Image (cartoon, rainbow, N blue to C red):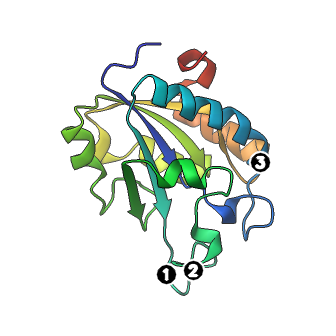
Amino acid sequence: MHTKNTALLLIDFQNDYFEGGKYPQHGADSLLPRLRQVISAAKAAQMPIIAIRHLGSAAAPFFNEGSAGAQFHLELHPELQELSWVVDKRHADSFRNTQLADLLQKLKVSRLLLAGMMTQNCITHTALSPWGTRLEMVVLEDLCAAPDPLVHAIAIRALADRVTVSSSQDWFA
C-alpha cells in the first residue's frame, strides 16, 4: 500500500443515512464492517483520516444540527470522534466554505481517498471540486452508498471519466 502523501476522507457517515435514519442509503449498513477495517489499516499506516460531517439548517429534511441523525453512525462514532480532524460542512462539496483545502495543504496531502454517502451528490461534488484540483482524487467505490444501486453505478461510471475509481482492496488489502 503506497500511502505517502495520502489521506482518507470519510464523508457523511451519519445516522440519518443508515437504517432507522431519515434518508437511509442502499447498502450503507453492509459497508460498515469493511469501513472499520479500512479505518484500522489507515491508522496503522499513520495515514491522516479526516471525517466530514454534514450539518443542515433547522429547515433541512435531515442532518439537523444537534440531532441524533447528524451524529456519526454509532458503530463509527467513537473512532471518528477521536480523530484529529473533523470538518463540518453545509454543502455537498466538502471543500466549499470549509477549512478542508487548508488542512490538506498543511498535512502535505496530494492524494485523497474518498469514501462516503450519496455517491451521486457529496462524493461526486467533492471529487470534482474546483478547490481540489491540485489533488489526485480516488473514489473507493465499495465504501460509498447511494439511494439505490443504479444511482450508485451511474455516479461511479460518470466519475471514472474524471477521477480514479478503485476498490478499498486495492489500497487496504
From this view, report whether residue 146 is shown above or below residue 153.
below
User: What kind of element bears circle 3?
Assistant: helix
Q: Residue at x 36, y 47 (%)?
A: 129
Q: Residue at x 39, y 19 (%)?
A: 3
Corner quadrant of residue 128? top left
Any part of residue 164 in sight: no
Whether tag 3 and tag 2 are in contact, CB under 8 A, the answer is no
Q: Nearer the viewer, residue 45 or 153?
A: 45
Q: Residues within 10 Å of mark 3 (few under 14, many from 20)?
A: some
Q: Nearer the viewer, residue 33 or 114?
A: 33
User: Considering the image in quadrants, where does the C terminus appear?
Assistant: top right
Any part of residue 15 in sight: yes
- Work out whether mark 1 precedes mark 3 in sequence or the reverse, and give the earlier one: 3
Whether tag 2 and tag 1 are in contact, CB under 8 A, the answer is yes
Corner quadrant of residue 163? top left
Name the residue carrying label 1: 57
Name the residue carrying label 2: 60
Q: Position of residue 93 (x, y in %)?
A: 42, 55
* 99 left or right of 142 in image: left
From this view, report whether residue 56 is shown above or below residue 172.
below
Name the residue carrying label 3: 29
